[in-house]
Image: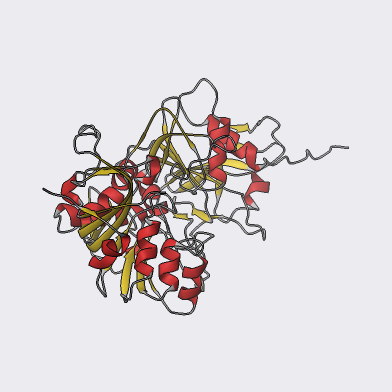
Amino acid sequence: MINKEVQNITAAVSYIDDGAVILSGGFGDAGAPISLLEALTKTDVKNLTIVSNNAGEGNYGLAALMKSGKVAKIICSYPISAGSIIFQNLYNNNKILLDVVPQGTLSERMRAAGAGIGAFFTPTSAGTKLGEGKETRIIEGIEHVLEYPLKGDIALILAKKADRLGNIIYDKSARNFSPIMAMAATTTIVQVEELVEVGEMDPELIITPGIFIDYIFVHNK
Amino acid sequence: MATTPKIVGLNRKQVAWRIAQEIPEGSYVNLGIGSPEMVANYIPDDREIFFHSENGILGMGPAPEPGQEDGNLINAGKKPVTLLPGGSYFNHTDSFAMIRGGHIDICVLGAYQVAENGDLANWATLDTTKPPGVGGAMDLAIGAKKIYIMMDHLTKDGHPKLMRNCTYPHTGQGVVKTIFTDLAVIDVINKKFIVRELARGLSLEDLQSKTDAPLSLVNNWLTISPPELN
């Protein structure tokens, strides 16, 4: 019988190795797998690359992980939210590398990784600093830049409900990047509020099918 | 003795009102973070408009009543919002497919500078000591069918923001359709700024003195007549 549930959070993050590229879900706090990130903070892995829309807020979750010195590089679209003090301090002291990617390109690069697409042309960033040095092509009169897939070793995501097979539904705008990241990583670990019986979720409404999920950690609030 | 009429510039709410009048029934609209969010407050009651939020919402409604906030229902500025009947949630790739794929009719953005050829600079300043951050600005700039800019006509220091060429880093090239400022409504047509509305008491010469690039005035130009909004 397939059962992807792990019994404790230490086990959940034990699949993460030094140097891993981690896709971390969420848009701001909505959808951020705070408990998984904080469990990772307590391990002794190092030299991580984080891919996330933002660079953490306050002193918790992703920000706490960065403060612990485990993050060598962050790939994100918007690291300069008002609350991203820890990131900004690390950046100003040259303690972290930053790669800024336009938000839609960030998402599409992960989709490409998850969908087996070798690369794609997008008009986003053509003629800007973020498009500099990239291969370009004029398609139907519009300049496009070539973008490559962004694959993760690990995805850490948050969802509302899962069954033991890893079928998942999310909550409102907390869905954001998570379904894409679940596809784009070799191993996907989901933090959920509730585990339900197989068959309980309407199959018409399941957002991420279990094929994309490897481990489930149930975090009761 | 003739008196010079007093120039009455629009306040921020009145600029938001003016933009709202420009949004037709049935439009799918994305409002940028900050002042553009105010546009939603002034949509005429008889128009059904769908607001898109880049983080995966169509049919976004106003802020909830105090105490009703839900951390999982936020806008692109990460502030609590609501979902209207008929609204939906979707993932980020679908959200940006709506943007890049030309499904968003109008996007209202702020700007540091706009050039007469429609180039937009709104994501980075010349200060390289701070980390950069672009968010969804570049996708929105090239993707929405019409880009409307909501901004002050001059910088806080009194420098023009409507330029021959942007001196700030580009967000997108040739993307801006119309600029709504506290002083005028200006279309970008064939790589030129064409003024179609002026604030009360303002002459084209006045406006030109506050603008880096040359301006032309359409023959049937109008005076902007916003309601009192304080």
Residue B173 occupies quadrant: bottom left
Coloring scheme used: secondary structure
The one nearer the camera, B98 or B76, is B76
> What residue do we see at 71% from left, 31% from top?
B228
The one nearer the camera, A119 or A127, is A119
Q: Residue furthest left?
A: A1
Residue A169 occupies quadrant: top left
Q: Residue furthest front?
A: A7
Give residue A168's position: percent from left, percent from top. 26, 43
- Examine the rendered structure and indicate whether residue B224 appears above or below residue B148: above
Instruction: Locate residue B145 relative to residue B93 in the image: left or right.
Output: right
> What residue do we see at 35% from left, 72% from top?
A73
Residue B218: tell me if it is visible: no
Instruction: Locate residue B123 relative to residue A201 in the image: left or right.
Output: right
Instruction: Locate residue B198 relative to residue B170 in the image: left or right.
Output: right
Residue B25: tell me if it is visible: yes
- Examine the rendered structure and indicate whether residue A31 appears above or below residue B201: below
Give residue A133's position: percent from left, percent from top. 29, 69
Give residue A128's position: percent from left, percent from top. 37, 62
Count every numbered label the image shows and give the total. Answer: 0
Quadrant position of the C terminus of chain B in the picture: top right
Residue B18 occupies quadrant: top right
The one nearer the camera, A133 or A190, is A190
Q: Residue furthest right?
A: B1
Give residue B11's position: percent from left, percent from top. 67, 41
Quadrant position of the N terminus of chain B in the picture: top right
